[in-house]
Structure formats: C-alpha cells, structure tokens
Image (spheres, rainbow, N blue to C red):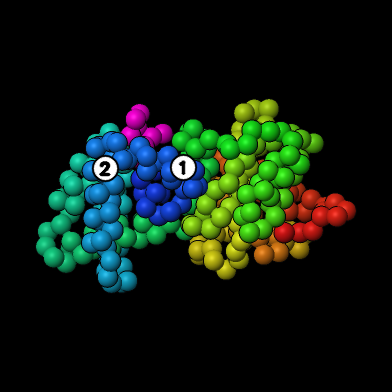
Amino acid sequence: MAERGHPRAELQELLDERLSSERRSELRAHVSTCETCQRELEALQSMRSLLRGLPDDPPDAAFTARLQSALAAETRRPARASRARGRILAALVTGAVAAGLVLWGIAQRAEVAYPSAAIGDYEALRTGTVALQFATADAGELERALVQLELGFRPRVLDLAMMGWRLQGGRASELRGAKAALFSYVDSAGRVVVCEMYGGTLKDLPEGGERFERGGFSFVEYQERGVRAIFWAEGSVICVLVGELPSADLRALAIAKAMQPVTRGERRP
C-alpha cells in the first residue's frame, strides 16, 4: 500500500504511463503541491535518463544474484526506499564497470512485461491504491458503461454468479500504455479475481509462461509474488485473469470464462 499522503508506489507507473487518465490527473495534481513526491519523481526521472543508451548484454549470474538479493531486502523497508536505493548502489558500485552493471539491472526491472503489469493492477486494486470506476453487480450495465469509454474494442463482461463469483464492478485501465477494461469478481470466501481485456496478441507475452490448451483456446500462465495471471486470446482482444487462487482453480475459471457461449446478437471481441 502507498505510504500515507505520498503515493510513491505509483510514481514509477506515472512515468511508465500505466495509470488511467483519471488517476494520472489526480497524481499530477498531488505532485504539484507535494515537495516529497516532487523529489521522488525527479529522482526517478534522473535515473531513467542515466539508463538510456546502456548495452543490452546482461551481467554475470553472481552479480545478478547479489543485486536481486539486495533489492529484495531493501524493498521490505518502504519508508526508507529512496535512501535504500542510494545505499544499494554505493555498496555494489566499485568501479565504472560495476556501475554500468547496476544500472543495467535496474533498467531490466523498469521494463515491465504484460504479466507484471496485470499483476500490479490486481495488487493496486486489492490494496485500495486504485478504486473501481463503476460499482455494479450487473454485467450488462458494466459492459455498457465500459463501451461508452471507447476503448477501441468491445469489452465482454460475464456474469459468473452461477460459478460462485459475484461481479463487483470495473473501470477503464491501461496495460503497458494500451487501453484496457478491468473488472473484478469476489467469491463467498472473500477471494478476488480481476479480469483485464486489451487489444493485442499472445506473441507479445514474454517467455517463461506455462502454456496449455483447452477447448480450442491457448492459455499462458505466469506467477509472481504468489499471484497468478492467465492470458488467452478472444479474436484480436487479449484477456487476462489474475488472482491468488491455486493454479487449478484459476485455470478452471479462465477456461470457463473463455468458453462462455456468445449470446445472439453478440460477437467475440
């Protein structure tokens, strides 16, 4: 969750243009009056400038392990995140070559792939960093509201109540700069799953996912920080279902959602 009064966790997303236009406006208004966030944003912008033009060759495995271990340890102390970055760099940089390797490692982390972006959206919703734009359990009502936003494709919102999942609502979102529709479901145990849809292709997904086939659909599953994301294509639209469910449960829900029959007058996106 963002630190009270200072939404540091969203500043990188602001630079990456991964926030909705509404949230970007809110965040920029806050930054314009907050010196702490102004300094944090300037530091991130300066780091981005330094990263330009770095070579693509990766550092050796030993150095990568040290860097990831240090970053993981420090990110558990969010109140000192800004100072922690400085200590990490100071400890690891022993010369010009080492400095280049550190910056290379951070650059790779800054390139957010679709699975990481979708999981980040799920976590933002779960922690309250991002709120639902339309709160409704009516799938048709939500679909009509999202269509009015002219996302470039027709969102397909399904009623999954018969499967034990109640629709909570949705919002317009962005996934790596692409317009997207996001909607959320909750079950009787309070577990939440989020579905996002955006125009794209499965070829844009990174390697490392676990692929499986069901009912004529190809699915790709990823996992980060205990959260799973399953992608599949519905025509020219990519759907991703994200949650902290066991793999078998999330797969069953994704398959059922993908294979939900199209009603009369409706077409696949």
Above-or-below relation of 60 to 239: below
Q: Position of residue 141 (x, y in %)?
A: 73, 39
Q: Position of residue 245 (x, y in %)?
A: 60, 40
171 relative position to 60: left or right: right
**Magenta extent:** 1-9
Residue assigned mark 1: 23
Mark sitting earlier along the chain (2/1): 1
Front-most of residues 241 and 269? 269
Residue assigned mark 2: 38
Q: Position of residue 43 (x, y in %)?
A: 24, 49
Residue 152 on the magenta span: no
Residue 77, visible in the rendered structure: no
52 relative position to 167: left or right: left
124 relative position to 27: left or right: right
261 relative position to 221: left or right: right
Query: Magenta residues: mostly which secondary structure?
Result: loop
